[in-house]
Image (spheres, helix red, strand yellow):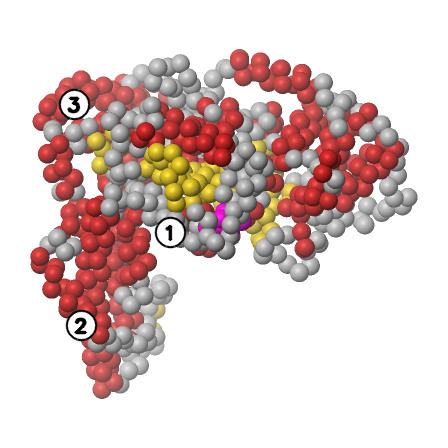
Amino acid sequence: MAKRDTASPDFSTGTTAIAEENPFGSWPTSELGAQALSYWIDSYQRTWLFWDVLRERGNVFVEHEKGGKPPVLVFEYETVVDGRTLEDPANYALVRITPPVDHPTDPTKRPFVVIDPRAGHGPGIGGSKIDSEIGIALRAGHPCYFVMFFPKPCPGQTIESVARAEGVFLKKVCELHPDAEGKPFVIGNCQGGWALMILAAVAPDLFGPILLAGSPVSYWAGVEGKNPMRYTGGLLGGSWLSSFMSDIGNGTFDGSYLVQNFENLNPSNTLWGKQYNLYSKIDTEPERFLEFEKWWGGYFFLNKKEIEWIVQNLFVGNKLSANEVKSADGKTTVNLYNIQSPIVVFASWGDNITPPQQALNWIPDLYDSVDEIRAHDQTIVYCLHEKIGHLGIFVSAKVAGREHAEIVSAIDMIDVLPPGLYEAKIEDTRPEMPHLELIEGRYLITFEMRTIDDILALGDGRVHEQAFEVVKRVSEVNQGLYDTFLSPVVQAMSNELTAQWWRMMQPDRLQRYMLSDMNPGMWPLKTFARMVREQRKPVSPDNPFVQFEAQMSEGIENLLDTYRDLRDTGCERLFKSIYESPSVAAAVGLDRSAGQQGAPKPDDWLRNELGRLKKLEHESFIEQGSSLDAAVRMLLYQGQDTQVIDERPFRLVQQFIREAPSDKRPTLTQLKQAFRRQSFILLLDEERAVNSLPKLLPEMDQRRQALELVYHIATARAGKLNDSQDARFRRIEEILGVTLFEARPASE
């Protein structure tokens, strides 16, 4: 409901004009009494039904626990690999999604793999609805796999155990689809995103494009006055608290604590809004409420070593985008420069858990410029939603039908995009668009070239991240003190019995137990609620008491939002007063006058040497190549000044490939290699590359055919060449000695 305007004083009468706002003002007294009675009956019934739904929620929670907390997938599935049986066991498994009968999968299409977050909740959110990441991929005919996990970790399990298991899963998917056109497209949701980045860096050959959906990678990033969650580690003194909570759990960390952190971000929804939404829509909301709560209340566990690694290396240490994450033996470094696959990032301005800065600032952490991105042969695409919340990125049907569907449909195109940085834009098609027949569905996806400055402009600068360097040092000191003096004491006082007692007393878990049929006091509620449903008399929406109720609810939410804002502002000021203090920085050995900003870029001579060798290799291809290389070089050259790429030219390329003779039909891999190689060659020496075209196309018929092909593809977007394209195209004609059109005005 929209907020009401503040009442304005009526100076002519000395009163305040509020008649339009007063929901009771226009009702006669007798009729108002009837409305009050109707509202009272409705409210009375809704109250009983509300508590009965909470009883059902408790029963769902208990039954879900008894059943082993399986994934909340709406799709049938079968286990392919159980990670608990591996040499280095992990509580993960690879399952194959059974496609619906009306949408059989195509074994020649690239498989999709979804990795869900293990952040307190259970798996399945990426496929909890028909309209979801998995549902969209199945409708497109792609074989789909899902990486799930079990409630309790294996003894001795570490993050490395999980990474090895996921590596085995990806190898298995590749083995099952040897004829697929392209390697698996892997989606990492939220915390699954950083796990995906790590695996793609250490085993790059297993991956096709990867999608980071609402995934935090640059943990210190954010905007001052917003994103309060990033201050939590500093205000708690670093990572020691996660170790303490693991110790009282007898070596196991309860994921319900992570869920509580999420809920604390938005107290108006946690304490009031979610419950009132159910109460006010008690006739239609229970099914959706119970489905969501089944996942939201399915608390999973991590080993102490796992949560310590996550907090110390990522949340507090922010080591991933600095290429400082190392294996336990110190022999392997997770180097994000090693990722060979195109990286797609999907974030939202409405996400208060993973804001766009945390999803994207790893890019300026790694690269100084777009030229450096291209030099590393990397393609990065990001898409920003205007307002969807964190969970909506995975569960919203609208997002699935628009953003996810368009990314899925364009994944082959993303795989062959020339290296660089792009922002994906999605818009409705219009009847006047040229070559509308080349657009699949109702949306057009375009890729606009961006720079590192565009990424940095999404935030308010990075100077404020210096304080988190101090947090990192303080955390290391406190962690050492805890490990030395307090941890042995806590461990000595803990056992499985005390750990289970702590878990049972966790407020959210205890609430679900108490409001379930485990509590004999709830038994009569089911019978009474059934009687209420049989006599249900919903009130009319225009009842003034219903409107007043909604206004009161809005006021309560506003009050809680005010509390949240004051709390977050106070936390930020306290954080700054501590960690921006020069004395605190000096106490932990940091020189604040050095002006550190962002993640340091190590002098990696091996990476530079590999880049030099790669340059020499591509130089050898400047004057040699196939007709495909020549056509791609011409296409890239004539569009060198084009800042926007959309799907229509690529759809036309796909059409030409399908129509080509089977012995001359390039594969997607060959097309990708051609685009990447020719893009790098043009970057090395554009003049020499263009002047060498006759050597790639020695025959005049080849040159004319290639020119005609390039012209049709280049005009697929706008229906004509712009001035820059036309000038470059004429230069190609002159170099090849072929004139495609005797007279062609640039505007045609």
Q: Which residue is mark 1?
A: 74
* Residues marked 2 and 3 touching at CB (< 8 Å): no
- Indicate which disc, 1 or 2, sits on the residue closer to the N terminus: 1
Q: Secondary structure at mark 1?
A: loop
- Indicate which disc, 1 or 3, sits on the residue closer to the N terminus: 1
Instruction: Single out the mark in the foreground, 1 or 2.
Output: 1
Give the mark count. Answer: 3
Instruction: Single out the mark in the foreground, 2 or 3.
Output: 2
Can residue 226 be seen here? The reply is no
Q: Which residue is mark 3?
A: 487
Label number found at residue 531: 2
Question: For this view, does 20 lie left or right of residue 205?
Answer: left
* Residue 637 x %, y %: 74, 33
* Residue 718 x %, y %: 72, 49
* Residue found at x 11% / y 29%: 495
* Residue 44 x %, y %: 18, 71
* Residue 426 x %, y %: 56, 50
Q: Amino acid at mark 3?
A: Ser
Local packing at callout 1 (Cα closer than 10 Å; few below 14, some 14-19, many 20+) is: some
Q: Which segment did they paint magenta?
A: 135-140
* Residue found at x 34% / y 31%: 83
* Residue found at x 50% / y 55%: 102
